[in-house]
Image (tube, rainbow, N blue to C red):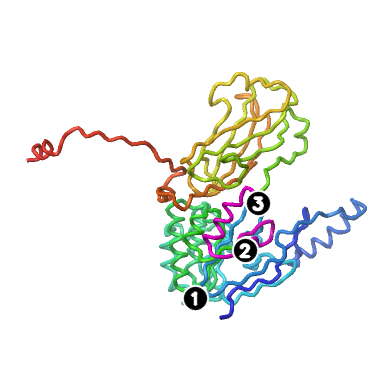
């Protein structure tokens, strides 16, 4: 059987600070005007630094196969999907797609903001090569799935991100593409909608269509995908049955990813506090993937270069939807000695208890302030980590609950009457 997706020696190079290759007449004219001005102002071209987001990636996908793609941020997952969706051109290599592609990579992908939801449904169908009659046949089903009936004739630019994702997924999944490509964007939706989308992708797969699915949620990957690719630094580190690949990823996470080191920002070295390193640790190991069952600790390595009286270190935790999960600071327990740190190097640790967070991707924002006076500095999303659920977790369904966290809380029930007394009262 011929593959429906064929990727051969695919590589993508980006020039840091440079624009993508010109693709329109307007871009070409702008480049022609910009080039002599650049040479006039700078005398010569600045040296460009390049990075390879993908390097010699090759794989095949058979018709009807459901393939997961996992790996840390920066591994090349989104770049790969953008090339497969023909949004970005590869630097080297080739891609052969033998079927219509429906993709959902970013909020609003493929939508025209000035058009209404109704108009965008027909526009996307036409892009996929469908006739108006084919689109009309699916129209009611799309609208019902997206739950956007009352906003159908409102321009998409007025939609919330959640509404946009609901409609975009409904369009991508229902207009019968042979290949459905879905990135982590589903995390924008609520828990009920995410479950609905996973059910639809499973339905699409059972109908014999091909699905490529990127997610940090290893439970969703394990539940949906037959085979998975593990990307690391732009290359395929492993491919095979999903449970084998996700287990390898979890087992080797500590070795695959070095401690996260702060890269100094211009001017930060001259500030009162210099941040050296931030790491996440579990069971004594630096890691980027933590079990939801066990506590884990975030460690800050920093220097006090000028004493800041009343200083407070704080963390803000958000999930991949951008939802605020919790805040904490070293004032949670009164620590006068922390508020007036003298000059020197320090290590601060904060531990999150096990059984609190749901599975998925999380981001710490770190800051230092003088309460009610000023922010000394703040570093958004300074560290990212993934929370996973062990395969033998007997409380697996707790992660499907509505809500940002999923603690197992202690319940106590006391029987106040016996069965005989209750029956008598009911007679």
Could you give the CA–CA distance between mark 2 and mark 3, rounded to whole angstroms?
Answer: 22 Å
In this view, the residue in front, 308 or 227, is 227
Using the image as rendered, state which of residue 28 and residue 171 is in the foreground.
Answer: 171
Residue depicted at x 90% and y 51%: 42
Which residue is the site of mark 1?
Answer: 132
Q: Which residues are the magenta region?
A: 230-254
Taking the image as drawn, is residue 112 in sight? no
Q: Alpha carbon of mark 1 to alpha carbon of mark 3: how far?
A: 49 Å
Looking at marks 2 and 1 on the same chain, the residue that comes earlier in the sequence is marked by 2
Left or right: residue 322 compared with residue 8: left
Which corner quadrant holds the N terminus? bottom right
Where residue 344 appears, as percent x and y from the top left, is 73, 25
Residue placed at 57% from the left, 71% from the top? Answer: 101
Depth check, front residue: 408 or 237: 237
Provide the residue designation for mark 3.
256
Where does the image place residue 34, in percent across and percent down from the top left?
83, 58
Disc 2 is placed on an element classified as helix
Q: Circles 2 and 1: CB distance less than 8 Å?
A: no
Q: Quadrant of residue 35?
A: bottom right
Relative to residue 310, is residue 169 drawn left or right? left
Which residue is label 2 attached to?
A: 81
């Amino acid at each position: 059987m011929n593959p429906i997706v064929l990727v051969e020696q695919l590589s993508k190079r980006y020039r840091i600070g440079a624009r993508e290759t010109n693709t329109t007449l307007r871009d070409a004219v702008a480049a022609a005007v910009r080039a002599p001005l650049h040479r006039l102002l700078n005398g010569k071209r600045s040296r460009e630094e390049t990075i390879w987001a993908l390097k010699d990636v090759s794989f095949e996908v058979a018709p009807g196969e459901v393939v997961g793609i996992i790996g840390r941020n920066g591994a090349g997952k989104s770049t790969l999907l953008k090339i497969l969706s023909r949004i970005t051109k590869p630097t080297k290599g080739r891609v052969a797609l033998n079927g219509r592609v429906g993709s959902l990579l970013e909020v609003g992908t493929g939508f025209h903001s000035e058009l209404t939801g109704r108009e965008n449904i027909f526009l996307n169908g036409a892009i996929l090569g469908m006739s108006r009659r084919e689109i009309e046949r699916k129209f009611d089903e799309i609208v019902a799935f997206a739950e956007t009936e009352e906003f159908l004739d409102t321009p998409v630019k007025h939609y919330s991100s959640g509404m946009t994702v609901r409609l975009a997924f409904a369009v991508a999944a229902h207009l019968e593409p042979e290949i459905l490509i879905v990135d982590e964007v589903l995390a924008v939706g609520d828990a009920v909608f995410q479950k609905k989308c996973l059910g639809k992708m499973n339905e699409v797969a059972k109908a014999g269509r091909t699905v490529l699915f990127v997610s940090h949620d290893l439970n969703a990957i394990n539940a949906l995908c037959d085979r998975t690719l593990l990307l690391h630094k732009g290359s395929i580190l492993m491919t095979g049955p999903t449970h084998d690949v996700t287990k390898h990823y979890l087992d080797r996470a500590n070795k695959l990813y070095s401690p996260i080191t702060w890269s100094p920002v211009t001017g930060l070295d001259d500030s009162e506090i210099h941040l050296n390193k931030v790491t996440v640790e579990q069971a004594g190991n630096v890691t980027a993937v933590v079990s939801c069952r066990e506590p884990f600790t975030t460690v800050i390595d920093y220097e006090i270069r000028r004493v800041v009286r009343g200083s407070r270190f704080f963390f803000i935790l958000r999930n991949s939807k951008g939802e605020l999960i919790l805040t904490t600071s070293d004032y949670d327990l009164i620590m006068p000695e922390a508020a007036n740190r003298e000059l020197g190097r320090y290590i601060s640790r904060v531990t999150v208890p096990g059984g609190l967070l749901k599975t998925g991707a999380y981001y710490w924002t770190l800051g230092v302030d003088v309460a009610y006076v000023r922010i000394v500095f703040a570093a958004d999303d300074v560290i990212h980590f993934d929370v996973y659920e062990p395969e033998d977790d007997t409380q697996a369904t707790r992660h499907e609950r509505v809500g940002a966290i999923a603690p197992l809380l202690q319940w106590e029930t006391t029987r106040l009457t016996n069965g005989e007394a209750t029956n008598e009262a009911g007679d």
